Amino acid sequence: MSEVSVTKDPGGPAPAVDDLVVLTGVNKHFGALHVLQDIDLTIKRGEVVVVIGPSGSGKSTLCRTINRLETVDSGSITIDGKPLPQEGRELARLRADVGMVFQSFNLFAHKTVLENVTLGQLKVRKADKKAAEQKARALLDRVGVGTQADKYPAQLSGGQQQRVAIARALAMDPKVMLFDEPTSALDPEMINEVLEVMQQLARDGMTMVVVTHEMGFARSAANRVVFMADGRIVEEAEPTQFFNNPRSDRAKDFLSKILHH
Amino acid sequence: MNVLLDHLPQFRDGFLGTLALTAASGALALVLGILIAGFRVSPVPPLRAFGTAWVTLLRNTPLTLLFLIAFFIVPQIFFPGTSPFVLATLALGFYTSSFVCEAVRSGFNTVPLGQAEAARSIGMTFFQTLRMIVLPQATRTVIPPLSSIFIALTKNSAIAGAFSNTELFNVSKLLSDKGFAIGWIFLWIALAYLIITFTISGLFRLLERRLEVAR
């Protein structure tokens, strides 16, 4: 991923437009709460899908089901044609191909920044130590925290930590990247530095699912906006279409609340 | 005073015996305890059940009963001719491992869930996650309760003295049977125990401070 930066070209020479992540009829309950209700969602290779919606609408849960951090009650999820396996070695292998960035960064607190980025390469991909370090440093440079490589996560600002988390996910050469509210725990001044890295990723052709409240990012980087409310996908549209002319009343209501103040 | 000087070799053997028993069974308890703690939080139901059964059984059985089983059943049925030291180490180690397990498990619970989720989402297996991410971060919180557990183990090792092991309690019994003043014997024996237990708490305090710097 880091070396081969594919220029984004939807419908380009390769058969790039195929379905990478497919959710069909997914249902999930938390006790009595029906958090995901008959979710059907297809994410194509190279596509950037931004999921927005009010709190508690199930968007984070949706994101977490894709690499099975949350199990589903019914329905199927396939990644690159393969259905998600049960917990075990095979699932671990599949997760390595799905990058995940969390709201609370979740960098390994007892490891340096460099170790955070090399660990997966060494232990999961069984990469050579030297190659792993080289790749980690290149990725850290790419997200703009190359000089912090030998520090511990707690010594970094939130924005820096989140960029390291992105580098850690990228080090696995993921097929798709999941972002679960990546900027929600950040100070306003640090949000942009993370969004810029994500913008760059999107331009480089990474397949991305982004749960966020950053409407600016949704407008500029998304190929498609998915609007969720009460556990359902209420509306799916191109960003300009969605923000200028939302079809559903629920979306209109949501946008009127967040865009005008 | 005379009791000590006149029987210095016995006291020394007793001291070394207690030390050896504590060290051997402590090491066994640590290894088993961490392993069983891993079982108890594993996603595999049979492993979890095994872990729970292990802890329930060993933690709730009187140690003396475990010694009786170790000395009268294990050699009769399974391994005849096993040395008293090994049998005592097994009894003490198994018993203490249940306490170590629970201390380690409580340590696991102090590590934020996000750490394990992050590890799993880069493709690490359950046991890789536990060993490389959760356990190292749990260590610091586990140190203080472990220190108490090992001190208790030191004192529990006295039971081995009643099962033909040479250790401090055994020596005190031999000497008092010979008619020496019991007050002095107890004083020296108590001091010997204190040397071991203070060393343990000192070592663990050192370890705690050492680990504090590491983040």
Image (cartoon, rainbow, N blue to C red):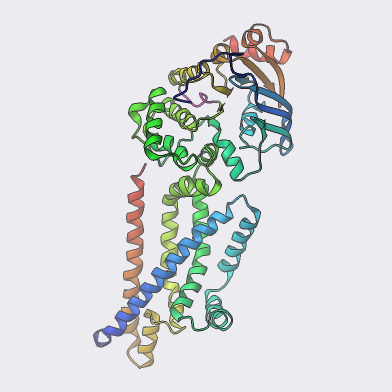
Relative height, residue A174 to residue B197 (above, below): above
Relative height, residue A172 to residue B59 (above, below): above
Relative height, residue A86 to residue A24 (above, below): below
B142 relative to A54 in the view: left or right: left
Q: Which residue is drawn at 62% across and 56% down?
A: B48
Mark yes or no: residue B101 visible: yes
Where, by quadrant of the figure, is residue A212 drawn? top right
Where, by quadrant of the figure, is residue A26 drawn? top right
Where, by quadrant of the figure, is residue A33 drawn? top right
Inspect the magenta stretch and tell me whether residue A260 lies in it. Answer: no
Instruction: Pinpoint residue A130: horizontal percent, then vertical percent.
Output: 36, 37
Instruction: Pinpoint residue B79: horizontal percent, then vertical percent.
Output: 53, 80
Q: Which residue lies furthest to the bottom in this view?
A: B178
Instruction: Pinpoint residue B205: horizontal percent, then vertical percent.
Output: 34, 56
- In depth, the one of B209 and A135 nearer the eye is A135
Which SS does the magenta portion mostly show? loop
Relative height, residue B104 to residue A109 (above, below): below
Q: Which residue is drawn at 31% across and 82% down?
A: B11
- The magenta region covers A182-187
Total number of numbered labels?
0
* Quadrant placement of the C terminus of chain A: top right
Q: Residue at x 43, y 29 (%)?
A: A164
